[in-house]
Image (spheres, rainbow, N blue to C red):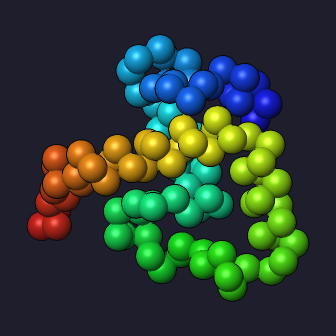
Amino acid sequence: MSDIEQLLTNESTSILNGEKIDYVDVSMAAMSGLWLSPEGYGGGKADGVKMEQAKLPQAMRGDITRWQQQYPNTVMFIERLYQQRTINGAEKMPAQDSTR
């Protein structure tokens, strides 16, 4: 996490790829999304697993807060990826064919 934090700035578009989002960015956001629960997490399809901060044990809330304080650039980056996904709209992603 410290390495990722050092690679990112307030304006970073990608962890490793300069200006283009790649699989490293998406993987990082996916792995951290459940923990951070950013706006737009799961695109409405993960509401059943989204953790409400108020219902978490105190130790877990404290750990999330420490993570947010220690890695602010990483947290902002992840939140920005989810925000962009929401703004750009999940409707731009191809719909799943449920007949298969």
The quadrant in which residue 6 appears is top right
Count of numbered circles in the view: 0
Q: How far across and how far down the image is residue 50, in percent? A: 54, 73
Q: Quadrant of the image for the C terminus? A: bottom left
Outermost residue to the bottom = 55
Give the answer, above or below, for where 97 lies relative to 5.
below
Identified at 44% across, 42% down, the residue is 81
Whether residue 24 is visible to the viewer of this picture, yes or no, is no
Say whether residue 31 is left or right of residue 81: right
State the image quarter where residue 75 is shown. top right
Q: Is residue 67 above or below residue 19?
A: below
In the picture as drawn, the residue positioned furthest to the right comes out as: 59
Which percent across, then down, holds residue 66? 82, 54
Task: Identify which residue is drawn at 75% across, 60% down.
Answer: 64
Going 84% across and 77% down the picture, which residue do you hit? 58
Q: Is residue 99 visible?
A: yes
Q: Is residue 99 found left or right of 72 in the rendered image? A: left
* Residue 89 x, y percent position in the rendering: 22, 52
Give the residue at x 66% y 20%: 7
Question: On screen, 97 above or below 57?
Answer: above
- Give whichever of 54, 100 is nearer the camera: 54
Quarter of the image with the N terminus is top right
Q: In the picture provided, is 81 more to the left or to the right than 64?
A: left
Task: Residue 19 in the image: state x and y as whole percent.
Answer: 41, 17
Furthest residue toward top: 18
